[in-house]
Amino acid sequence: MTIDEASRRYGVPLDILKEYEKLGLCPAVKKVMGTWQYDDSDLEKLSLIMTLHDVGFSTGEVETYMRLVEDGQGRDYKLLSMLDQKRTAALDEIHFREKQLDRLDYLRHKIRKKIEEQ
C-alpha cells in the first residue's frame, strides 16, 4: 500500500506518514518504483506512533520510544518509565486546569451574587 493509500484508508495525515518514513522506524517498509509500500506490521507501528503523538509525545520522544520497541528485550522498564512520565505530566495539567476552573467559578459566583443583590 502506498503512502497516499495508507493515508486515505486509515485517516493518517501525510505529514505523520512522512515523519514515520524519515525516522526510518520500520525497516520492513519497502520502496517499490519510487514509493514506500506499507504492510500490516508497518500500519500497527504507525498506529502506535499516532497514539504516542495523541498523548503528547514529541517527535523526539516518539523516535526514542519506537527505537526501544524495535530493540525489544529488556526495554519494557524504559518504555513504562516514559509512559509514566507522560501520565504524570497529564495529571499535573489536569490538576492545574481544575484549579483554573475553581477560580473562574468563584469569580462567576461573585458576579452572580452581586447581580442578585441589585
Image (cartoon, rainbow, N blue to C red):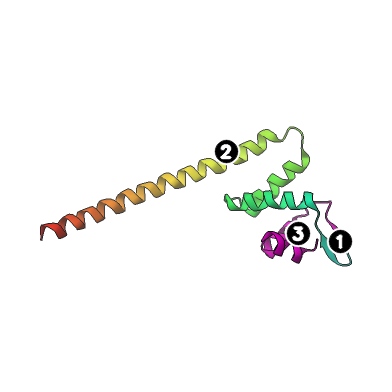
Assign a secondary structure to mark 3. helix
Q: Residues within 10 Å of mark 3 (few under 14, many from 20)?
A: few
Quadrant in the rendering for residue 83 = top right
Q: Is residue 5 magenta?
A: yes
At 69% from the left and 59% from the top, the residue drawn is 10
Q: Is residue 99 left or right of residue 17?
A: left
Q: CA distance from mark 2 to mark 1?
A: 36 Å
Mark 3 vs 2, N-terminal side:
3
At 73% from the left and 42% from the top, the residue drawn is 69
Residue with the mark numbered 3: 22
Q: Residues within 10 Å of mark 1 (few under 14, many from 20)?
A: few
As drawn, 5 above or below 108: below
At 59% from the left and 52% from the top, the residue drawn is 54
Which label number is shown at residue 84? 2
Which label number is shown at residue 31? 1
What span is in magenta? 1-30
Q: Is residue 9 magenta?
A: yes
Which label number is shown at residue 51? none
Assign a secondary structure to mark 1. strand
Q: Main secondary structure of the magenta part?
A: helix
Q: Quadrant of the N terminus?
A: bottom right
Q: Nearer the viewer, mark 2 or mark 1?
A: 1
Q: Nearer the viewer, mark 1 or mark 3?
A: 1
Q: CA distance from mark 1 to mark 3?
A: 13 Å
Name the amino acid type tagged 3: Lys
Name the amino acid type tagged 2: Asp
Q: Is residue 111 left or right of residue 36?
A: left
Name the amino acid type tagged 1: Lys
Q: Position of residue 42 (x, y in %)?
A: 77, 52
